């Protein structure tokens, strides 16, 4: 483990044991190995992966008390961020990783198997489709997304998965005020309320971050999310 990773974890008040440190190491090695044959990340330097993917994923503790969360869905998880780092650091979580690219799901399953993670599933499909299924709709305490998309679009993808009383957290850059303003209509329509925009810097780095925290107050109407493609083409 790098000393910087330890210091950053300390800032986040996260304490990892030897097994968890080993799992992060294995995750990094698999990421680099698979990245040679498919595009998982543009960041491959070890310290940068630890900071810009692992620490960044875990920094959600600034916005949510993870100990009080049981179920999480990670929408557009890509190479498993933030879902897999959260599962490693907080093994009690039950996590669903959702991604539309099957090659990425194969990678995620390999990570889950190699790291011997229980209570985590990788699903291949679109957010618009799985949100219509009874076993996933309004079933989660927390929905997270580090996916690059407009906030209004992400809200339509993510809010239908959260139970009333649950939370959606969007990982954004620090310049997000205009996006929040534009998303207010979508939040209202989908049964949520913007609770907070938590701005901070990744510890020991120059990286600015915002967590947009949205509380789910009402059941989302059945017609949302709209059919595939519409949430991104025509945000609410």
Image (cartoon, helix red, strand yellow):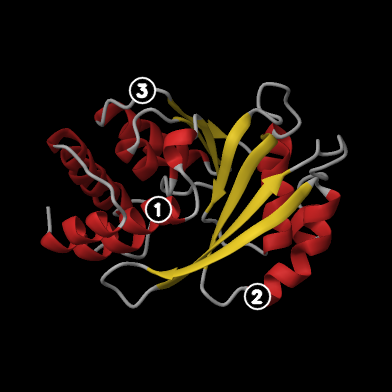
In-front residue for pair 78/205: 205
Circle 3 is placed at which residue position? 118
The vertical placement of 88 against 175, above or below, is: above
In-front residue for pair 103/220: 220
The percent coordinates of residue 137 (x first, y second) are 71, 30
In-front residue for pair 42/82: 82
How many marks the image carries: the answer is 3
What is the secondary structure assignment of the residue under circle 3?
loop
The reply to whether the C-beta atoms of the residues labelled 3 and 2 are less than 8 Å apart is no
> Which residue lies at the image location 80% right of the left edge and 45% below the top edge?
191
The reply to whether the C-beta atoms of the residues labelled 1 and 2 are less than 8 Å apart is no
Q: Residues within 10 Å of mark 1 (few under 14, many from 20)?
A: many
> Which residue lies at the image location 38% right of the left edge and 42% below the top edge?
86
The percent coordinates of residue 102 (x first, y second) are 51, 38
In-front residue for pair 120/200: 200
What is the secondary structure assignment of the residue under circle 2?
helix
Foreground: disc 3 or disc 2: 2
Whether residue 236 is visible here, answered yes or no, is no
Q: Earlier in the sequence, mark 3 or mark 1?
A: 1
Q: Earlier in the sequence, mark 1 or mark 2?
A: 1
> Which residue lies at the image location 44% right of the left edge and 69% below the top edge?
200
How far is mark 1 from mark 2, CA to CA?
Answer: 21 Å
Q: Earlier in the sequence, mark 3 or mark 2?
A: 3
Circle 1 is placed at which residue position? 57
Foreground: disc 1 or disc 2: 2
């Amino acid at each position: 483990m790098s000393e910087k990773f330890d210091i950053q974890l300390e800032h986040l008040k996260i304490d990892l044991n030897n097994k968890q440190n080993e799992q992060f190491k294995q995750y990094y090695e698999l990421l680099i190995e698979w990245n040679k044959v498919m595009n998982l990340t543009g960041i491959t330097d070890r310290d940068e992966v630890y900071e810009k993917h692992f620490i960044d994923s875990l920094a959600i503790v600034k916005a949510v008390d993870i100990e009080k969360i049981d179920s999480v869905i990670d929408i557009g998880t890509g190479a498993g961020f933030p879902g897999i780092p959260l599962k490693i650091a907080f093994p009690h979580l039950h996590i669903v990783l959702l991604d539309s690219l099957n090659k990425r799901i194969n990678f995620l399953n390999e990570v889950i198997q190699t790291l011997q993670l229980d209570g985590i599933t990788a699903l291949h499909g679109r957010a618009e489709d799985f949100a219509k299924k009874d076993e996933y709709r309004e079933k989660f305490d927390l929905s997270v997304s580090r996916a690059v998309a407009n906030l209004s679009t992400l809200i339509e993808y993510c809010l239908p998965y959260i139970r009333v009383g649950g939370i959606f957290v969007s990982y954004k850059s620090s310049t997000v005020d205009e996006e929040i303003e534009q998303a207010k209509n979508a939040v209202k329509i989908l049964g949520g309320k913007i609770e907070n925009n938590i701005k901070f810097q990744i510890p020991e780095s120059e990286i600015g971050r915002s967590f947009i925290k949205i509380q789910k107050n009402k059941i989302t109407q059945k017609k949302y999310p709209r059919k595939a493609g519409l949430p991104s083409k025509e945000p609410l």
